[in-house]
Image (cartoon, helix red, strand yellow):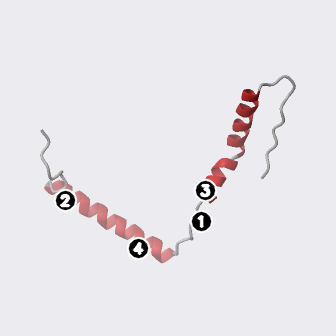
Amino acid sequence: MSLKVEKKERETTQSLIRRFTKAIKQSGILKEARRRRFFQRPLSHASKKRAALRKLRAREEYEKKEKLGLNKNQFPKF
């Protein structure tokens, strides 16, 4: 993807930069570049499922401890 913004006659540098920034945001180039910055290997179906189950169990355990009052800070607040 390429984007070309040329300076108009009697246009200040600041307004040119503003137009360029606006064009970049609207085109989605910056968003795509940030997404591609670090390669993430696609996960298999089984590993996605294992991760979801692990997260679910952790949440249940947290809620259980919360009900028992075990998730409070170790030090009393004054």
Along the line of sight, the residue nearer the viewer: 27 or 30? 30
Q: CA distance from mark 2 to mark 4?
A: 23 Å
Disc nearer the start of the sequence (4/3): 3
Q: Kindly identify the amino acid type of the residue bearing the numbered disc 2.
A: Lys
Residue 47 is left or right of residue 73, and the answer is: right
Residue occupying image coordinates x 85% and y 29% = 8
Q: Secondary structure at mark 2?
A: helix
Crowding near the residue tagged with mark 2, few <14, some 14–19, many ≥20 C-alpha atoms within 10 Å: few
Task: Name the residue that disc number 1 marks.
Answer: 39
Residue holding disc 3: 35
Mark 4–mark 3 contact, CB under 8 Å? no
Q: Where does the C terminus fall, quadrant-wise?
A: top left
Tell me where residue 36 sits by quadrant. bottom right
Up the image or down, 36 lies above or below 12; here it is below
- The residue pinned by badge 2 equals 65
Give the mark, 4 or 1, whose residue is nearer the N terminus.
1
Q: Disc 1 and disc 2: Cα gap in Å?
A: 37 Å
Residue at the disc numbered 4: 50
Residue 59 pos. (x, y %): 30, 61
Q: Name the front one of labels 1 and 2.
A: 1
Q: Amino acid at mark 1?
A: Phe
Q: Is tag 3's residue or tag 2's residue first in the polypeptide sequence?
A: 3
Task: Report whether 52 appears left or right of 45.
Answer: left
Residue at left 51%, top 74%? Answer: 45
Q: Secondary structure at mark 1?
A: loop
Question: Comparing marks 4 and 3, which lies closer to the viewer?
Answer: 3
Residue at image coords 57%, 70%: 41
